[in-house]
Amino acid sequence: MPDLTTIKTQNLRALVEETEERLEELRGELERREEAQQHSEIDRLDEHMKNAELSIASIRDFISKMLEEMRGNASKP
Amino acid sequence: MAPTDVTQETTEATKQKWLQWLAVAGLVYLLICAVGMIGSGFKSATGDQAKELFAFALNPFAGLVVGTVATALIQSSSTVTSIIVGLVAGGLPVEVAVPMVMGANIGTSITNTIVSLGHVREKSEFKRAFSAATVHDFFNLLSVVIFLPLEIAFGVLESLGKMLAAPFYGGADASMKGLNFVKAATAPVVDTAKGVLLPLGPQLGGILLIALGIVLIFVSITFVGKLLKRLMVGKAKEIMHTAIGRGPVSGIFSGTLVTVLVQSSSTTTSLMVPLAGSGAFGLKQIYPFTLGANIGTCITALLAATAVTGNGEAALQIAFIHLTYNVLGVVFIYGLPFLRDIPVRAAEWLGATAAENKLAALAYVLGVFFVVPGVCLGVTSLF
């Protein structure tokens, strides 16, 4: 990073503008990627619908994970 | 595959789809009949004593707890609100039913919370999923905190519901001509059930009619939900694809639409859980969608209210109260910036806590939906 105090005001202004443009581009790209990921998850909606159903197995998993965690906490000195 | 095989397969699929749609229509018909049965059964069993019978629920807090626990146990707010509509048609006072409807909103949010427990294997995924589920809970709790006192003090929702129902029953000319058609269409089934059960005595027959109605509502809503999920998944995809990147209002609108299509807010809000768990959707994108689910679910009670016998205006009033309550909840809580983020922050905090300590998640589910309401019900019954 150059010493900012040595940069001319005009150049500094141009640098700010350029950075803002770049930032905007980066934000746009990030947004595009996030939206693409969202679209691809929605394409798997059938699968998600199945995962969104109540199941005894998942409750059992949760309880065993919780008990494991509790045992782990209890054995800690 | 030979072209004839393809044609045959397509014809089979189309036939299957038509059969499924026919089943949906039959089940909706059954739902409307069942609500009519509950109304008739309740009227017969209680005579003019409905108000006395539900005197315990005149305490609005007791009504709220009844609605919450009943919905949490049945896991369907549509079922509970449809039963409430039937009971109101049979003589249950509207002011007793309003807190019950609010409670149904809280109770229904247990489903997606339990679904989120399935993401327990991976800590950060569980954190996201649990937050996405509980943002709905916190919104519904906040909504009750705001609107229940207003309702007790001023009867705002009751007045709005009455105002909205009045045009359908206002005068002789404005009476529910269109809706009477539904009533006439369901009369043969309801009258047959009445004819079989009521000769057993007004009270026993009435109670059996209510029980039959509850079973039929439960069966029809469960199977309609399953069928619509299969039939509407393509449409739901389209709606959700369209909503991406278009802001919160579009999210609310698409949440409403998807819920209307699948006839279940639990389906919509539970669907948000794996989407959030995957990390593709943030809490701020999930939140508006779940609010839309609250609005979309009101369609079932409105549909149920079209064909009741007895006090049809009161039944329509409570269905409109359900709708108004949910719309106003979204408008006020989401519309006011200082209220909007409260459910999000609370859900983020709870998600982070539960990810570190799973016992907190279990304590939350049992506490909010069963223990606290149970204790409150016990305490209020003492006074």
Image (cartoon, coloured by chain):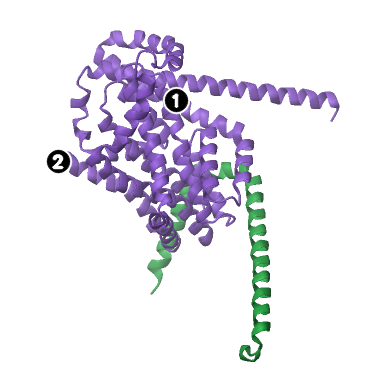
Give the amino acid at mark 1.
Leu
Q: Colour of chain A?
A: green
Badge 2: few (under 14), some or many (20 or more) residues near its Cα, within 10 Å? few
Image vertical order of residue B34 relative to residue B358, above or below: above
Residue B311 screen position, x and y as percent? 31, 19
B244 to B260, vertically: above or below: below
- Which mark identifies residue B382? 2
Label 2 amino acid?
Answer: Leu
- The image position of residue B82, as x and y in percent, is 39, 28
Badge 1 density bin: few <14, some 14–19, many ≥20, Cα 10 Å: many
Image colour assigned to chain B? purple
Q: In this view, does A11 lie above or below B341?
A: below
Please tell me which residue lies in front, B80 or B198: B80
Residue at left 43%, top 66%? A72
Quarter holding residue B94: top left
Q: Which mark is residue B303?
A: 1
**Horizontal arrangement in the rendering, residue B214 relative to residue B128 (left or right):** left
Count of all numbered marks drawn on residues in the image: 2
